[in-house]
Image (cartoon, rainbow, N blue to C red):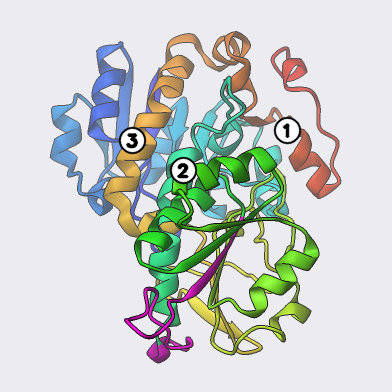
Amino acid sequence: MKIGCVKEIKAQEFRVGMTPAAAREAVAQGHAVLIETGAGLGAGFADADYVAAGAGIAADAATVWAEAEMVVKVKEPQAAERAQLRPGQVLFTYLHLAPDPEQTADLLKSGATCIAYETVTDRMGGLPLLAPMSEVAGRLAPQVGSWALQKANGGRGVLMGGVPGVRPANVVIIGGGVVGTAAARVATGMGAHVTVLDRSIPRLSYLDDVFMGRLTTQYSDRAATEELIRDADMVIGAVLVPGAAAPKLVSRAMLATMKPGAVLVDVAIDQGGCFETSHATTHQDPIYEVDGIIHYCVANMPGAVARTSTQALGNATLPFLLALANKGWRQACGDDPHLLAGLNVHAGRITCAPVGAAQGLTAIDPVTALKL
């Protein structure tokens, strides 16, 4: 198979879809790899690194889109990229389609086969291609939130760990999954007082055991959320409904009850955000204010630490990438129901039920799509 990788064009996105190590593995198994020139520079990989791995270098993205049978990316294709997709071509990347009808329409029109990292599953019910970026984003959330809390950036002027005689920041984390656990680890390490909300009692029990009393756990309901955010200096939104739009757990009305200058960090923004007042921002212009509350809603948080993120993502995606290349997408997905769960669009049809439900579109069973 001819595998292509283009430079990311989304604002302030420095990650790359294939590392030189991944390219080397693919070439060793008999595949051709074509990398757009400069694609890896943001993550610290030069063209020479890819050439040494056996890959070819394309002068521009158009060449990669035109020649590759499968294109591997990080972020969802932008409008100019979607226009270059063609029937029979495989796209393997994050898509986050549920809150993005424009992208969905373009992918359906393209006739391409689109497999989304974020809906690939594993035997434990986890999301193995989302988990490494969730880990990165979770660890970043308290860090960027503490920056936003500084008075010069519009925040309350509260230090996360406080000082002797002064209380630390109150941090509320909504969701105790991969993002929430990673955020809690860093926030407690910074000395903050941390409360994690979740609706899974086993998950709350797990967090209580792992953190050995260094944080507070709370069953998540509307009353608890309203009570906790009133005293919060920072609220981290870490909820996920696989493939679907994120639920809005903090309404605009609730902002009026919060402390002026408190910070909301919406890690769920890729799926539409879990705060009613969230809208996507970039690393260039990451924060904005609504009703006195600072919002940090960068849609590609892991892009800030591009080298770490690229390596972590590459480790997770490589086995699936090789399966798709070695077997072709139909056999690879037919052999692996977990990879099949990643199929979101094929031949002009939605193949992911949560995406269809979010947009009011009819979705077909992905098993049926294998026969189209």
The reply, left or right, for residue 315 in relation to residue 47 is right
**Residue 55 higher or lower than 269, as above or below:** above
Q: Is residue 259 above or below residue 14?
A: below
Vertical relation: 20 (above or below) 284 = above
Element assignment for label 1 = loop
The mark total stands at 3
Residue appearing at x 35%, y 48% in the figure: 7
Magenta segment includes 255: no
In this rendering, the label closer to the viewer, 2 or 3: 2
The circle drawn on residue 210 is 2
- Residue 109 rendering spot, x and y as whole percentages: 70, 40
The amino acid type, in three-letter code, at marker 1 is Cys
Residue 368, compared with residue 137, is above or below; it is above
Give the image location of residue 328, x and y in percent.
Answer: 51, 13
Name the secondary structure under disc 2. helix
Mark 2 is surrounded, within 10 Å at the Cα level, by few (under 14), some (14 to 19) or many (20 or more) other residues, namely few
Q: CA distance from mark 1 to mark 3?
A: 25 Å
- Give me the C-alpha separation between circle 2 and circle 1: 35 Å
Q: Which residue is mark 1?
A: 352
- The residue lying at 20 percent from left, 34 percent from top is 50
Front residue of 275/210: it is 210
- C-alpha distance separating marks 2 and 3: 34 Å
Disc 2 or 1, which lies upstream in sequence? 2
Would residue 55 be visible to someone looking at this image? yes
Q: Report the disc number at residue 18.
A: 3
Bounds of the magenta segment: 151-174
